[in-house]
Amino acid sequence: MNENRIKILKEENIDKALFKLGIPMVISLLVAALYNVVDTYFVSGLGKEAVAAVSVAFPIQLIFLGIGLTF
């Protein structure tokens, strides 16, 4: 699989290569955002403080997810 990615970067146009290799990261970040919306909905029954905690933790979660997907 790694050889296939290297081949894409070597042989294809850089725009197409970045698009092909970036799709999984974009999809995973969209899933994380959807998870946050659903999580906020269920946590909203617990009160304002719980929703605030979820809202503060979400950007931190996205940063760690983005760093993890980079490697």
Image (spheres, rainbow, N blue to C red):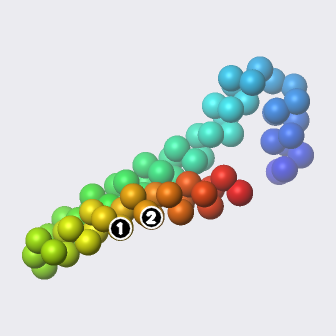
Q: Nearer the viewer, residue 48 or 10?
A: 48
Hey, which quadrant is residue 48 in on the image?
bottom left
Which residue corresponds to mark 2? Answer: 61
Which residue corresponds to mark 1? Answer: 57
Q: Is residue 40 left or right of residue 66?
A: left
Q: Is residue 2 left or right of residue 50?
A: right
Identify the amino acid type marked 1.
Answer: Ala
**Residue drawn at point x = 82 percent, y = 33 percent:** 9
CA–CA distance between discs 1 and 2?
6 Å
Q: Is residue 61 above or below residue 11?
A: below
- The reply to whether the C-beta atoms of the residues labelled 1 and 2 are less than 8 Å apart is yes
Hey, which quadrant is residue 31 in on the image?
bottom left
Residue 56 in view here:
yes
Residue 7 screen position, x and y as percent:
88, 35
Quadrant the C terminus occupies: bottom right
Hey, which quadrant is residue 56 in on the image?
bottom left
Q: Nearer the viewer, residue 11 or 49?
A: 49
Element at badge 1? helix
